[in-house]
Amino acid sequence: MLVAMARSLVVKATAGADAPERCAQAFTVAATAAAAGVHVSLWLTGESTWFALPGRAQNFELPHSAPLAELLHVILTTGTVTACTQCAARRDIGTDDVIPGVRIAGAAVFVEETMAEGAQALVY
């Protein structure tokens, strides 16, 4: 009897309002996978780190794109959202500043997640 291996998806968003289409693609893919039952870990790096703060996702607009705040909610409800340690520090974002459910972690955790058996990593 074959047992299906659990799959996970690690999505690294490297863009924010500076590259809105790339940012929205990362969130859309992560939320779509999460809604389909895939375990998703979304990493906020670079300018996307700002979306770890309350209210920031609500202010993001891109025509013909699902609202970023809704996509983030889906991911937070079913998966993991992480702000990069160094990226957060460069923006003076601390653990008390982020949306409940968002963690701050660094490269070692990212490598651990991406190297896990059955993991697929995407970078936007």
Image (cartoon, grey):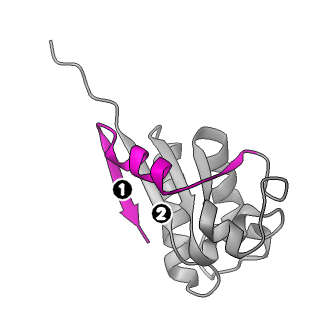
- Residue in view at x 44 percent, y 40 percent: 38
Q: Residues within 10 Å of mark 1 (few under 14, many from 20)?
A: some
Of the 4 image quadrants, the one containing the C terminus is: bottom left
Query: Is the C-beta separation of discs 2 and 1 under 8 Å?
Result: yes
Residue under pointer 1: 121
The alpha-carbon separation of the residues under discs 2 and 1 comes to 8 Å
Residue 67 can be seen in this image: no
Is residue 19 shown above or below 103? below
Circle 2 SS class: strand
On the picture, is 11 further left or further right than 66? Answer: left
Most foreground residue, 56 or 91: 91
- Residue in view at x 55 percent, y 56 percent: 106
On the picture, is 71 further left or further right than 28? Answer: right
Residue 28 position within the rendered picture, expressed as x and y whole percent measured from the top left: 52, 63
- Asked if residue 75 lies in the magenta stretch, the reply is no
On the picture, is 116 further left or further right than 110? Answer: left
Q: Earlier in the sequence, mark 2 or mark 1?
A: 2
Q: Residues within 10 Å of mark 2 (few under 14, many from 20)?
A: many
Three-letter code for the amino acid on which mark 2 is drawn: Lys
- Residue in view at x 78 percent, y 69 percent: 58
Q: Magenta residues, as a range?
A: 101-124
Q: Residue furthest bottom?
A: 18
Three-letter code for the amino acid on which mark 1 is drawn: Ala
Is residue 1 shown above or below 27? above
Most foreground residue, 63 or 15: 15
Identify the disc placed on residue 12: 2
Identify the disc placed on residue 15: none
Residue 31 position within the rendered picture, expressed as x and y whole percent measured from the top left: 54, 54
